[in-house]
Image: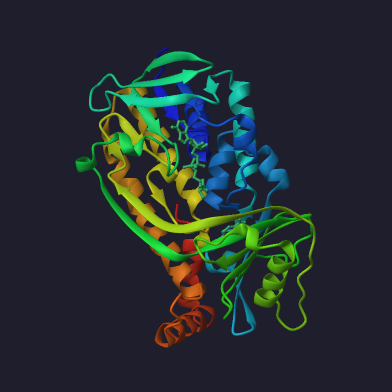
Amino acid sequence: MRTQVAIVGAGPAGLTLAQLLHVEGIDSVVIENRSREYVEARIRAGVLEQGVVDLLTTAGVGERMTREGLVHEGIELQFAGERHRIDLKRLTGGKTITVYGQTEIVKDLIQARLTSGRPLFFEVDDVRLDGIGTTRPRVLFRHEDAAHELDCDVIAGCDGFHGISRPSIPANALRTFTREYPFGWLGILAQVAPSNEELIYSNHERGFALLTMRSPQISRLYLQCRPDEDIAEWPDERIWEELHARLEVPGWTLAEGPVLEKGITPMRSFVAEPMRHGRLFLAGDAAHIVPPTGAKGLNLAVRDVQLLAEALTAWLRKGSETLLDAYSTSCLRRVWRAEHFSWWMTTMLHKLEDGDPFAVRLQESQLRYVVSSESAATSLAENYVGFD
Ligand code: APR
Ligand code: PHB
């Protein structure tokens, strides 16, 4: 087989790239090691920056998102038993965010890919990258018991944090930066109308909690827990008890409903530099991870491939390598801004492990500052809605 762009991974990064290239008339082949059912059922993030919504719409995959996505003009921060609204729209000159599950975006993108008639292989095995330091890279893989060799001009490594693209780069050509957090998030999906119209980020002495949603009928809720927490120790009653304690304020109650799904997410910050090695370009979680507190993971993945699609189009259509050469540097500038914002939100909102009283007072002071100073609130807001 031969194609222009071999895309490894059918998550939001790989599938969005495939769609953007299709719009430009550029050939690609997408390979994914999981099944379509698995990829379409995976519950992940849910907050989209305005710029990401606009990009997906322009790329022709925004129809259902426009219909079903929930546009939010603000978020709420809760601490010391009080709730404070951050008016994202007013503070950013009119920008909003859209709540629409990553799972739904992935379904829409897979549908678009199938409609385009271009190749997308699920359940591939033994994926290997070859010749990434040469001008003739190849992807080797097995599909339905047959061995395949895919010749291409470039490889897009969109295979997430645990993929094979990043480890295919020689260790001495990559620098990595990591921060592990001493907590995780226990997330549930519940069949109950969200108890609040907007997201609530709560700093509480029992630990952080977040109320978010997927639709007018489905709530998504998270609790700070230990990173090694055993989900078996969290029957539904215990989860609800903890959510009530951490989210409720006088005059406001959290409605319960059947728990449809639950799981634990580790919290990590990670960046690999540069995001390119020869003819291999990394995008999304393959290159960087943020803790979910800033809701940036999915947005960063889409923004990476936006730049990559532009750069590949300029190269494959007009022979210009300028944008490709700038790809890693341009992405990393935005990635590090999101890394800082996500680390900052995480540090400000979570119960710190050692309960250091000095750090607790700093958190309180920072939260008060954010909700009482126009400049501090604007800083949070402009990062939250994303930079264009
Ligand atoms: N070969 C082919 N596909 C692979 C391989 C491999 N060796 N290894 C992993 N994959 C697939 C995974 O099964 C997954 O479907 O690559 C895909 C990577 O998708 P994501 O992990 O969703 O990463 P990305 O597309 O960068 O999107 C980032 O996902 O983790 C969330 O919060 C994160 O919202 C962010 C988004
Ligand atoms: C989500 O809806 O899953 C969500 C929202 C905001 C976050 C993280 C996750 O910061």
Q: For ligand 2, give the image quadrant.
A: bottom right
Q: Is residue 118 visible?
A: yes
Q: Residue at x 65, y 49 (%)?
A: 100
Residue 167 or residue 89, whichever sits in front:
167
Residue 136 rendering spot, x and y as whole percentages = 28, 19
Residue 262 drawn above or below residue 310: below
Looking at this view, name the residue that lies furthest to the left: 172
Residue 183 rendering spot, x and y as whole percentages = 49, 66
Q: Residue at x 47, y 68 (%)?
A: 346
Residue 388 rendering spot, x and y as whole percentages = 45, 52
Q: Is residue 27 visible?
A: no
Residue 101 rendering spot, x and y as whole percentages = 64, 48
Q: Where, quadrant-wise, is the N terminus in this rendering?
A: top left
287 left or right, relative to 118: left
Q: How many marks?
A: 0
The colouring scheme, among rainbow, by chain, secondary structure or one colour, is rainbow
Location of residue 177 (image quadrant) = bottom left
Q: Residue at x 68, y 70 (%)?
A: 243
Residue 377 or residue 92, whichever sits in front:
377
117 left or right, relative to 24: right
Residue 180 drawn above or below residue 80: above
Q: Residue at x 48, y 43 (%)?
A: 302
343 left or right, relative to 135: right
